[in-house]
Structure formats: structure tokens, C-alpha cells
Amino acid sequence: MARPDGRRPDQLRPVTLTRGWSMHPEGSVLVDFGDTRVLCTASVTEGVPRWRKGSGLGWVTAEYSMLPRSTTTRSDRESVRGKVGGRTHEISRLIGRSLRACIDLKALGENSIVLDCDVLQADGGTRTAAITGAYVALHDAVSWLADRKALAGKPDKVMHRSIAAVSVGIIEGEPRLDLNYLEDVAAEVDMNVVCTGTGDFVEVQGTGEAGVFAREQLDALLDLGVLGCAELTEAQRKALAG
């Protein structure tokens, strides 16, 4: 079946990573996955949370949010509601876990980096776009620390692997890569795959939205996820080189 935007089943949406999009943070990246746009910033602070003090280890954490009109209808800001929603908590934790997998917290020293991922426009895959862009923002923040000789270890040892993420799913029996919103809401199986630059898995989140799925379907989705993450890793490499 034809996809809504005419892509092949194994084709990513156009991906753009714009570094230095915001002038104040130590690292900032505007990431576009098709019509999904997420601003990822990395803010460095000296010191670590109280429970981490004296350990010699740094800390990396993340916060995720969606602007009120990033979707087709306006949503209230969570600050106005008075509490952060469960989905927001879950995605924030996913981003933090994913990015901690690429950094040597001991080499970071007792410094903290907060990754803020704000969805400006949503068309599916916001959490995977956030992880992919946050990696580049984190890399720039670590380089900022290195330039000021504020790392406890060698700069090339701090970021010891790359991290990227992509969504995959099954729509009317067909495995597809990088779902947009129309595909996401119609998916029989929906999955998010987080991979290192060498194709190892950091995290896999998958569910049968409209039933169950077979082992061969799972394997097909994981293969698609690894393929997509490899292409995103190359896009990250080019962004950091340029």
C-alpha cells in the first residue's frame, strides 16, 4: 500500500539537524523529521544533585514538553494544569536513559547537563526525534566543557558512542519505518527503537495496538529500526562535522 507521503516502507522522512539554533544554551539543535520539529537544548551547570555529591560522577537528565499548538488542536500547558502528565514523565525518562547510555559520567566530572526537548510541531515520532537531536546538543555541550578544561576525563572518552532513535510500525500488515501521525494512529503494531551508532540496542518500546504480533514481525521491525538508526547516525555525524 502507498504511504500517505509516498515514501517506501523502509524510507525515513527528510531529516534536518540544525546546530546552534538557540544562542544561549551550551548546545542546541532544531531537529526536523518531516513535519515533526523539536528544539533540543543542552544546559550545563556546575555540580550535581544532592544524592550524587561526592561521587565524582556527573549527571545527565531530560525534560520533554509539547507547545500548546504543536498539534491540530490546542492543549493547555501542563504548568497551568498544575501537574506533569504521565506521558510527559515517561518520555522525559526515556530521553534521559537513552542519552546516559552514550556518556561516561565519571569522565564528565561533577557537572550536570539538562536536555530540554520542546516539540514545536508534531506529526508523529516526537520522542525519537527528540532523542536523535538531543544527542547532537549533548555532544556540543560536552565540547563546550572541554574547551573550558572542565572535564574530569579526555573529551574523546566522554562521549563514547552515538545514540539515535526511530519509530517503526505495522500498518495493514506492512512493516514501515518512521511513522507520521496518520500512520501512527492507524498502526496495528507501534514501536520505538533506540540504537547506538554500531547498531546495538539501548531500548525498545513496542506494543500491539490492535492485536498481537508474531516473532517474524518483531524481527522485521527491529531490522527496520536498525536501518533507520544507521541513517540517522550518519545525519548526526554530518551535522557535527559541518
Image (cartoon, rainbow, N blue to C red):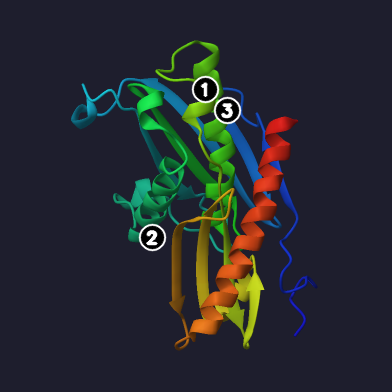
Mark with earlier residue (1, 3): 3
| Residue 118 % position (x, y) | 52, 45
Cα separation, mark 2 vs mark 1, equals 34 Å
Mark with earlier residue (3, 2): 2
Residue visible at 60% across and 61% down in the picture: 226
From the image, tell me which residue sits under label 2. Answer: 87
**Displayed quadrant of residue 205:** bottom left
> In the current view of this chain or complex, which residue is farthest to the top?
148
| Residue 139 % position (x, y) | 55, 31
Residue visible at 51% across and 35% down in the picture: 160
Residue visible at 59% across and 64% down in the picture: 225
Q: Is residue 220 above or below residue 173?
A: above
Q: Secondary structure at mark 1?
A: helix
- Which amino acid lies under the numbered mark 1 shown in the image of this protein? Pro
Cα separation, mark 1 vs mark 3, equals 11 Å
Picture disc at residue 50: none
From the image, tell me which residue sits under label 1. Answer: 155
Q: Residues within 10 Å of mark 1 (few under 14, many from 20)?
A: some
Cα separation, mark 3 vs mark 2, equals 28 Å
Picture disc at residue 140: 3
- Which amino acid lies under the numbered mark 2 shown in the image of this protein? Arg
Q: Is residue 42 visible?
A: yes
> In the current view of this chain or complex, which residue is farthest to the right?
6
Relative side of 239 to 41, left or right = right
Check whether the beta carbons of the residues at disc 1 and disc 3 lie within 8 A of each other.
no
Q: Secondary structure at mark 3?
A: helix
Q: Is residue 33 above or below residue 188?
A: above
